[in-house]
Every structure is written in C-alpha cells, then in structure tokens.
Amino acid sequence: MATSGNKIVEAIKLIKSDAQFSVTEEDIDQIEWHNGTTPISKADIQTKMDELQAEYDAEEWKRNRQAEYPNHNDCIHALLDGGDTLTDLQAKRQEVKSKFPKETEWTLK
C-alpha cells in the first residue's frame, strides 16, 4: 500500500469521501465516527484495504524498474551524445526491463 498516510483513513475516504471520523493508533477497532457519519463496517473497510494492497503489490515491477533505470540526466546526456552512450543507455534500460518484466493479468500470481 502507499507508504504515506494511514491505510484505514485512505480506505474509508475511498468508500465515503465525506466521512468524518478519527482513528486511534491505526487500529480498525478504534474508529470513532463524528457528526452523524454513518459507520462503515469493518469488513467493508478491510475489503477496501485489501484491494488497495493488491493494487500496490501488482505494481511492484514499476517501482523496481524506476529504482534501477538510468536517471534523467543520464538519459539527456545519452540523447545529446548519441553513439555508444545512447546504445549503452538503451542496453541498460532493456536489462532493467528484462530483470523486472511488466506483469499482466495472466502473469500475476
């Protein structure tokens, strides 16, 4: 799941964007609903959290590629320099793509 923010808060806001509530210690059992907000069931919140986690997990290949791809400055210099510099850059990018293949619906576990 996203590394910033509270997973419970994110799930609740996606279920009901105008919900008013507080959560103590990121504990699904410690949600307090405010100003007449109709409580959302723990099961619905957990289901949404599981969906968000699955979406995050499914994009691990993207995060891995991004971490290993050449940076923007390297790309700009390779484009400007051309020749072997550009060829080397393209080889590096292909190596990263092969190491972390794009997952599709039929390759997901």
Image (spheres, rainbow, N blue to C red):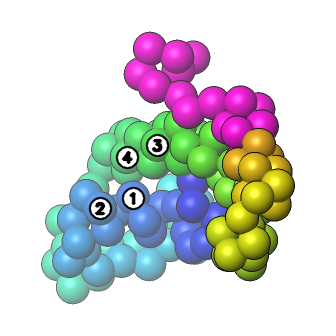
Question: Eyeballing the image, is 4 above or below 52?
Answer: below
Describe residue 57's horizontal placement relative to residue 77 as left or right.
left
Q: Which segment is the magenta one? A: 93-109
| Few, some or many residues within 10 Å of mark 3 (<14, 14–19, 20+) | few
Q: Amino acid at mark 1?
A: Ala
Q: Earlier in the sequence, mark 4 or mark 1?
A: 1
Q: Are marks 2 and 4 in contact (CB under 8 Å)?
A: yes
State the residue position of label 3. 55
Q: Nearer the viewer, residue 80 or 54?
A: 80
Describe residue 67's horizontal placement relative to residue 39 as left or right.
right
Q: Which callout, 2 or 3, points to the residue nearer the camera?
A: 3
On the question of residue 34 being in view, the answer is: yes
SS for dot 4: helix
State the residue position of label 4. 48
Question: Eyeballing the image, is 36 above or below 3?
Answer: below
Q: Amino acid at mark 2?
A: Leu
Q: Which callout, 3 or 4, points to the residue nearer the camera?
A: 3
Q: Nearer the viewer, residue 86 or 27?
A: 86
